[in-house]
Image (cartoon, grey):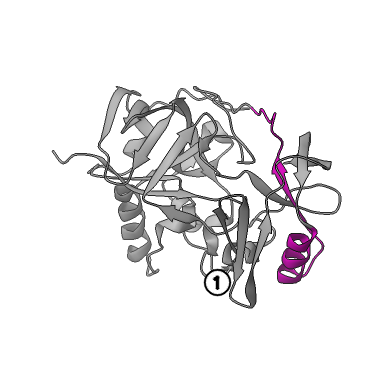
Amino acid sequence: MSVARVAALVHYPIKGLSGVPVEQAEIGPSGVAGDRTFMLVDPDGTFLSQRSVPAMAALRAELAGDTLRLAAADAPDLVVPIQYDGKRRDVSLFGKWFGLGVVQDAAADEWFSARLDRPVGLVRVTPEHERPGWGVHRGETGFGDAHALLITSLSSLDGLNERIASRGGEAIPMNRFRPNVVVSGWSEPHTEDRVLRMSLGAVEIGYSARAIRCAVPTVDQATGRKSGPEPTRTLASYRREPAYGGGVSFGMKAAVLTGGTVTVGDEILVHDWIPAGTDPAPATR
């Protein structure tokens, strides 16, 4: 039996923007260090995502010390200072006004507004930010949808792409699912569904819930354009989740039980399994 290992690590400094692959990452209570600590919002404070603004996928943000470097194909890079505290504004996720965000540099607002052709503002989590997740292991999260980590596996993607090919479609890359950790070495697709508790190197994580997919996986992450109906169409043929309102799933959401450093290539050890065919996560948040 092959050894399961960390095949890839990715973080997303600004929610909804392109992912940044890394070889090593510090993982704390709310996930990969720097993951989704920034967010774009409408003038009223409502968050933006690829669900409604797919062009966000083609924009890139990278952390560089106390600065944020913004990049796009149609504009020069912009480097702005990070405001860890200062002026604040109310922000909302999924219709819930859950707290405050720290207003960032006006130059960043202008840069994003020009790229996305709409007025937007960039905010960062506050120093005292606390936001619990939900599920079997609740954990914490920054501006992520609801959980610290998203775990996927290469075998799950291979199984999906085989089904897509059988329908005459083209294979899709893993970045459509925007994972934080990609696992290699599991022979059975969707093994991550059955992991209750496992270690990635020095980091221990606990299963929260299955990852129910919205329309984002139909967005080409290189161009920022919708290219559906795959993978949603094929997932709907075998990954419907009645316990989650009939949505389709791919990957699992996890909480961080013990933080530490993870490196690509680290061995993955499963400590506890969920019995096959069951899902202990609650149907509602």
Spot occupied by residue 230 in the image (x, y as percentages of width and height): 48, 62
Counting the numbered discs, the total is 1
Spot occupied by residue 245 in the image (x, y as percentages of width and height): 59, 36
Classify residue 145 as left or right of residue 196: right
Residue 234 visible in image: no
Q: Identify the residue shown where x is 54% and y is 59%.
A: 18
Closer to the camera in the image, 215 or 71: 71
Closer to the camera in the image, 39 or 128: 128
Hey, what amino acid is under mark 1?
Thr
Q: In which quarter of the image is residue 56?
A: bottom right
Q: Regarding mark 1 in the picture, which secondary structure is present there?
A: loop
Q: Identify the residue shown where x is 75% and y is 39%.
A: 85
Residue 222 visible in image: yes
Question: Which residue in the protein does label 1 denote?
Answer: 223
Q: In which quarter of the image is residue 151?
A: top left
Classify residue 95 as left or right of residue 197: right
Binning the other alpha carbons within 10 Å of mark 1 as few (below 14), some (14 to 19) or many (20 upward) gives some
Is residue 131 positioned above or below 33 on the image? above
Classify residue 42 as left or right of residue 278: right
Is residue 184 positioned above or below 56 on the image? above
Residue farthest toward the right in the current orientation of the protein = 44
Spot occupied by residue 103 in the image (x, y as percentages of width and height): 78, 47
Q: Does the magenta stretch include residue 113?
A: yes
Closer to the camera in the image, 5 or 93: 5
Could you tell me which quadrant the C terminus lies in?
A: top right
Residue farthest toward the bottom in the current orientation of the protein = 74
Could you tell me which quadrant the N terminus lies in?
A: top left
Classify residue 257 as left or right of residue 65: left
Q: Identify the residue shown where x is 69% and y is 58%.
A: 52
- Which residues are drawn in magenta? 106-131
Spot occupied by residue 76 in the image (x, y as percentages of width and height): 63, 75
